[in-house]
């Protein structure tokens, strides 16, 4: 059954993914300013996100918030969203069809926010937005050009914050990538964008 209803960047009603409709408590839309310079894209809501209706509010969210703060940013300064807006059962990865189903919502959100820089948090959003395989550990911190919904975008590849919970040695690379993102768009401390240097 295809049934969608949207309001701006938000999806109000959607039943395109039967398994996710079954497993979700609610649709988890992006949060943060619709004119944010930085847009973070994760994979899918987890249990805490599903419960609270907000992306990255569980343990991974705490890691992200800490890294943002260390980079001179507050969570409210940035836009945060996911590739799919409904929690997969057992926290499994989203299926390709589910990513495809939700792609237009993400594309529309990126177009609406029109960020200076998109930061992909983990392999799934990296591969979805760059449309190629991504070796996320090796490529973390790199800035690449992408075409998203026909528009040229700058994308910074980053680890998923959960990776730092499983492997503490990834923490520095994660924090450095977030600091690079803040530095590049000049939002930390109100500085100037350095994206043209890349
Ligand atoms: S994941 Fe996206 S496309 Fe699938 S049901 Fe939820 S809102 Fe709809």
Image (tube, helix red, strand yellow):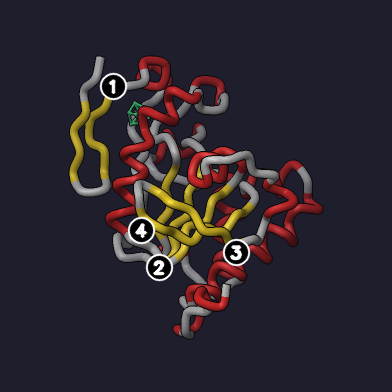
For ligand 1, tell me if the residue under mark 1 lies within 8 Å: yes
Q: Contact, CB < 8 Å: mark 4 with mark 2?
A: no
Q: Contact, CB < 8 Å: mark 2 with mark 1?
A: no
Q: Contact, CB < 8 Å: mark 1 with mark 4?
A: no
Q: Contact, CB < 8 Å: mark 4 with mark 3?
A: no
Kindly report which numbered mark, 4 or 3, lies closer to the viewer in this rendering.
3
Residue 170 drawn at (x, y percent): 76, 53
Quadrant holding ligand 1? top left
Nearest to the observer: residue 147 or residue 16:
147
- Give me the disc on residue 46: none
Judging by the rendered image, the residue that carries numbered circle 4 is 32
* Res. 77 in view: no
For ligand 1, tell me if the residue under mark 2 lies within 8 Å: no
Q: Quadrant of residue 24?
A: top left
Q: Is residue 41 left or right of residue 2?
A: right
What kind of element bears circle 4? loop
Q: Is residue 50 left or right of residue 162?
A: left
Residue 189 drawn at (x, y percent): 49, 83
As measured in the structure, the alpha-carbon distance from the residue carrying label 2 to the one carrying label 1 is 31 Å
What kind of element bears circle 1? loop
Mark 1 burial class by Cα count in 10 Å: few <14, some 14-19, many 20+: some
Q: Is residue 41 left or right of residue 71?
A: left
Judging by the rendered image, the residue that carries numbered circle 2 is 37
As measured in the structure, the alpha-carbon distance from the residue carrying label 2 to the one carrying label 3 is 13 Å
């Amino acid at each position: 059954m295809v049934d969608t209803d949207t309001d701006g960047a938000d999806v109000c009603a959607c039943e395109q993914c039967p398994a996710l409709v079954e497993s979700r408590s609610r649709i988890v839309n992006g949060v943060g300013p619709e004119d944010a310079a930085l847009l973070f894209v994760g994979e899918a809501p987890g249990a805490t996100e599903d419960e609270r209706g907000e992306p990255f509010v569980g343990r991974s969210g705490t890691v992200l918030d800490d890294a943002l703060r260390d980079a001179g940013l507050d969570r409210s300064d940035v836009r945060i969203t996911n590739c799919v807006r409904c929690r997969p059962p057992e926290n499994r990865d989203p299926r390709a069809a589910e990513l495809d189903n939700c792609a237009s919502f993400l594309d529309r959100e990126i177009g609406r926010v029109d960020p200076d820089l998109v930061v992909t948090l983990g392999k799934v959003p990296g591969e979805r937005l760059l449309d190629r395989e991504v070796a996320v550990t090796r490529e973390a911190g790199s800035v690449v050009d992408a075409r998203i919904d026909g528009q040229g975008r700058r994308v910074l590849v980053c680890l998923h914050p959960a990776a730092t919970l499983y492997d503490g040695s990834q923490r520095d690379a994660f924090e450095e990538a977030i600091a690079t993102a803040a530095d590049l768009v000049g939002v930390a401390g109100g500085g100037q964008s350095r994206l043209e240097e890349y």
